[in-house]
């Protein structure tokens, strides 16, 4: 099995925009195709998919999934910016540190609510007709609204907090995990454990260690089924099929008299 390969020519893959998604940058799309090239050419994969939604516990959408010789499973995550890389590069310790901020935020919120209640009562007693114009009430209300916004922001951070690069369940679904990023975007020393690093040439910058993944026919069939489903969806989108809440809407471009 080839784990390290080098392309002789400079990058210049022109895959067009056939499978490009609307929210995808041109750089991200070209990096995906560079990863596809490496998986096909150097890793020997013949079953590859973009935006593959994996099944089972901890299932998630990965940028590329592939199956190579001897049923070797590859996962590639594409990172076009440092911020994108950092979003997934959190550890369990980072999550615990984030959760420790919850109690102080709750205490501040309870205090803001009590203060607002007291300020409301005072304003209504002092100015029955236009009590909402009372400065003390306005100040307490502004403080309460600011705390409410902080609470919503905090909940969003926790709900979207990603430990993808360090999640044992995610690392257990493939033999090799790679990050695809432009050259020098991710320093070799910052590549997470159990991951390798590819660049847009495509070259292997850091080889991914092979993991001892317990595979059976069910796991492999799930991966292949997920890749097939993803490729079917990509082909349909490329042909102009629209996906709505009510289902797929196919284009009607044949002559009605045909």
Image: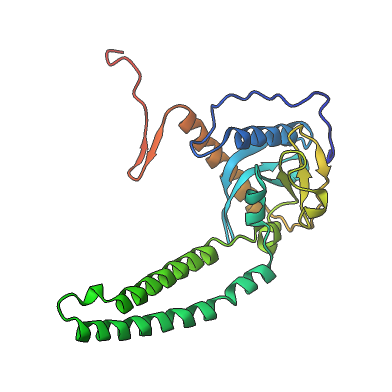
Q: Quadrant of the C terminus?
A: top left
Residue 153 spot, x, y in % from top left: 48, 64
Q: Is residue 199 left or right of residue 28?
A: right
Q: Image point 23% across, 74% down: which residue?
A: 132
In the picture, residue 200 is in which quadrant? top right
Is residue 9 depicted above or below 127 in this figure? above
- Name the outermost residue toward the left: 129
> How many discs mark residues in the rendered view?
0
Residue 12 spot, x, y in % from top left: 71, 24
How is colour applied across the structure in the image?
rainbow
Residue 65 spot, x, y in % from top left: 65, 44
Q: Image point 69% across, 71% down: which residue?
A: 93
Question: Of residues 242 and 134, which is closer to you in this image?
Answer: 134
Q: Quadrant of the N terminus?
A: top right
Q: Is residue 56 left or right of residue 211?
A: left
Q: Image point 76% across, 52% down: which residue?
A: 195
Q: Is residue 58 left or right of residue 37?
A: left
Residue 135 visible from this viewpoint = yes
Residue 221 visible from this viewpoint = no
In the picture, residue 43 is in which quadrant? top right
Is residue 7 depicted above or below 170 in this figure? above
Residue 129 spot, x, y in % from top left: 14, 77
């Amino acid at each position: 099995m080839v784990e390290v390969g080098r392309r002789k020519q400079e990058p210049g893959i022109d895959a067009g925009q056939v499978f490009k998604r609307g929210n995808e940058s041109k750089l991200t799309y070209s990096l995906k195709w560079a990863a596809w090239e490496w998986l096909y050419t150097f890793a020997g994969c013949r079953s590859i998919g973009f935006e593959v939604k994996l099944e089972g516990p901890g299932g998630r959408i990965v940028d590329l999934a592939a199956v190579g010789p001897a049923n070797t499973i590859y996962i590639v995550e594409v990172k076009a910016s440092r911020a994108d890389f950092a979003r997934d590069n959190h550890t369990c310790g980072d999550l615990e540190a984030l959760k420790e901020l919850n109690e102080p935020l709750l205490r501040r919120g309870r205090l803001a609510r009590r203060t607002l209640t007291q300020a409301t009562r005072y304003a209504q007693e002092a100015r029955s007709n236009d009590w909402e114009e009372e400065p003390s009430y306005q100040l307490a209300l502004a403080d309460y609204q600011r705390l409410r916004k902080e609470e919503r922001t905090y909940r969003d951070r926790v709900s979207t907090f990603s430990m993808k690069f360090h999640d044992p369940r995610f690392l257990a679904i493939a033999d090799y995990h790679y990050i695809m990023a432009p050259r020098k975007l991710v320093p070799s020393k910052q590549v997470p454990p159990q991951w390798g690093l590819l660049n847009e040439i495509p070259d292997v910058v850091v080889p991914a260690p092979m993991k001892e993944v317990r595979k059976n026919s069910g796991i492999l069939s799930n991966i292949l089924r997920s890749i097939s489903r993803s490729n079917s969806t990509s082909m349909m989108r490329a042909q102009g099929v629209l996906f709505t809440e009510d289902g797929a809407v196919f284009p009607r471009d044949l002559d009605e008299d045909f």
